[in-house]
Image: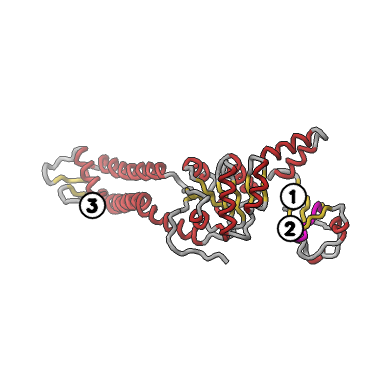
Amino acid sequence: MHRIDSRPSPFSLDRKSGTPIWLALIWRVLLALGLIGIAIAVHWFDREGLRDSLDGEISFADVLYFTMITVGTVGYGDIVPVTQQARLFDTFVVTPIRLFVWLIFLGTAYSFLFKRVWEKWRMNVIQRRLRDHVVVAGYGTSGSEAVNELVRRGADPTTIVIIDSNSAALRAAKECGATVMEGDATRNAALEAVHVAQAKALIVSAGRDDTSILIVLTARRLASQVPISVVIRSEDNEAIAKQAGADTVINPASFAGLLLAGSTHGAHLAEYMADLAAADGRVALNEREVTEDEVGKPLSEIETGLGHRIYRGNQIFGFWEAEARRLERGDQIVEVVPRRGI
């Protein structure tokens, strides 16, 4: 069993914040100015209720000074409210404004200082509790499409962790709500930081076959049981990726070739293949384990969908083969189901 290292990691997670910092700052400044403006306006229109102990006259500068001092502190006593109306306004309006303005200032300090400390601590907690998540190494064209497809299929973006050394790619990845980490996925420390051994699956799309294969090698050594899918662009490297430990090797060019070739044998073949693969298709491929009620029955009699293939240990049987006439415990079924059946 892989042991979780409790020492501080040099890598830290990040996740999109709900409100941009600049927008929060502008909103708070405008709110504070609005509250102070209300106090200045009322004091000016009710300046007869104020008395200046220096010259007895209340100018706009005096109103501005009195308001700012009163909102910021409790005043110096050189200008005071003398009428009942002015005193009530200072009691029930200016005093709450003073409290709100101080809360705004404290909230701003929290956002720009304390919140950073809080977010760092929160990300460390998330990092320690990572379980059953999907790790995506590389957020290029294929990696981003994989993440988008996972989200379209109903995956919670917070359960997806993306590793990439490109900060621009990570900024784009944060927009979908995923957790991101800047680092080199070929290194043990980076994969350990995202707890790859406790992950539900690993998707590798580094953009280069040699880098992707090295990531697979590193991940397989750290996580012997985690399913690994890798994008390989050269057909010559597919076997190497399998030997490195990848469970699934996908060649985008080969898959596109399959669709193109299929379209020449029927106008609807390529459309149906794309329908199976897309999240918004009418049908979908589903893999599951045989249930107790299905043991002993033929593959053709399952009620959840159309059975296509059986995985029995290291053997693969199609629906037309004799082995498909009797399902056994532990069999994995690949079936075509209506999209609502997933």
Question: Would residue 339 be found to the left or right of residue 108 on screen?
Answer: right
For marks 2 and 3 on the same chain, the one whose residue lies earlier in the sequence:
3
**Residue position marked by numbered label 1 in the rendering:** 285
Asked if residue 310 lies in the magenta stretch, the reply is yes
Question: What residue is at 57 percent from the left and 52 percent from the top?
Answer: 135
Question: What residue is at 54 percent from the left and 52 percent from the top?
Answer: 161
The quarter in which the N terminus is drawn is: bottom right
Pinpoint residue 176: horizontal percent, then vertical percent: 55, 45
**Residue position marked by numbered label 2 in the rendering:** 288
Other-residue count near label 2 (Cα within 10 Å), few / some / many at <14 / 14–19 / ≥20? few
User: Of 67 and 177, which appears nearest the observer?
Assistant: 177
Question: Would residue 257 be found to the left or right of residue 83 on screen?
Answer: right
**Residue position marked by numbered label 3 in the rendering:** 73
Residue type of the residue flagged with mark 1: Leu
Residue type of the residue flagged with mark 2: Arg
Asked if residue 231 lies in the magenta stretch, the reply is no
Question: Would residue 122 be found to the left or right of residue 178 on screen?
Answer: left
Secondary structure mostly seen in the magenta stretch: strand
Question: What residue is at 51 percent from the left and 58 percent from the top?
Answer: 192
Question: Would residue 280 be found to the left or right of residue 191 on screen?
Answer: right
Question: What residue is at 24 percent from the left and 45 percent from the top?
Answer: 68
Other-residue count near label 3 (Cα within 10 Å), few / some / many at <14 / 14–19 / ≥20? few
Q: Is residue 247 visible?
A: yes
The Cα atoms of the two marked residues, 2 and 3, are separated by 68 Å
Residue type of the residue flagged with mark 3: Thr
Task: Specify the farthest residue to the left.
Answer: 54
The stretch of residues the image draws in magenta is: 307-314
